[in-house]
Image (cartoon, helix red, strand yellow):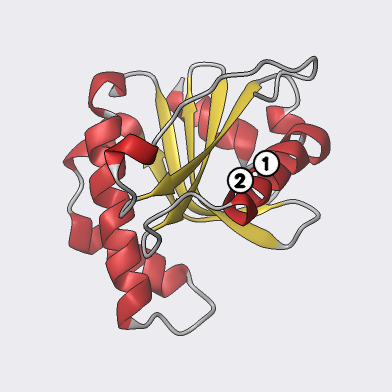
Amino acid sequence: MVTSQITALDSLSKRFYFGEGIKEFLTDDEKRIIGELVIASRHDSNEETVKSWSEEISVMKSALQGYSEQGSVFFEYNIPRLGKRADVIALIDNVVFVLEFKTMNDEFTREAYLQVWDYALDLKNFQLGSRDRKIIPIVVATKAPDSSCEFVLDHYEDDVY
């Protein structure tokens, strides 16, 4: 099931820097994952980038604890048409979670919401493997106070929330 999910999202070429089943990800070594991200990156991986990846890995390992048998996770996933990368895609059952991390931000900005919304729409409309799936875009501002976090799930006709 996990292999077919990876194949469904990655039909023609490798579109991500790192990806594996959630079960394997939860037990995988953070340094090994970061090493794969650095090797796959076409850009210089500076200290800030590596620190952000480390924080993203930590958050995702915590968030995915209850889903070890249900899907896959991808880091630095190339978005069709936009030529940009979503920080993390989590594929759980028939739902695609698109996560945009703002590890240096202490607030949730409108620009971040628009960015992750664009990613979700492009995945829905320009990638065959996600066309029939529910897509939920999420902004993660790791330095924002808990009181400013909200989760609103509005359903649209195209199954992008």
Instruction: Please report the residue visible at 27 percent of the width from the left and 56 percent of the height from the top.
Output: 55
Q: Can you identify the residue that label 1 sits on? A: 117
Q: In the image shown, does 132 or 118 lie closer to the viewer? A: 118
Residue 121 visible in this rendered orientation of the protein: yes
Query: Quarter-wise, where is residue 61 in the image?
Result: top left
Q: Is residue 138 above or below residue 154?
A: below
Is 62 on the left or on the right of 103, as rendered? left
The C terminus is located in which quarter?
Answer: top right
| Residue 134 screen position, x and y as percent | 64, 20
Q: Is residue 15 visible?
A: no
| Disc 1 + disc 2, Cβ < 8 Å | yes
The alpha-carbon separation of the residues under discs 1 and 2 comes to 6 Å
Q: Secondary structure at mark 2?
A: helix
The local crowd at label 1, few if under 14, some if 14 to 19, many if 20 or more residues have their Cα within 10 Å, is: many
**Location of residue 85 by image quarter:** bottom right
- The residue tagged 2 is 113
Q: Residue at x 29, y 50 (%)?
A: 57
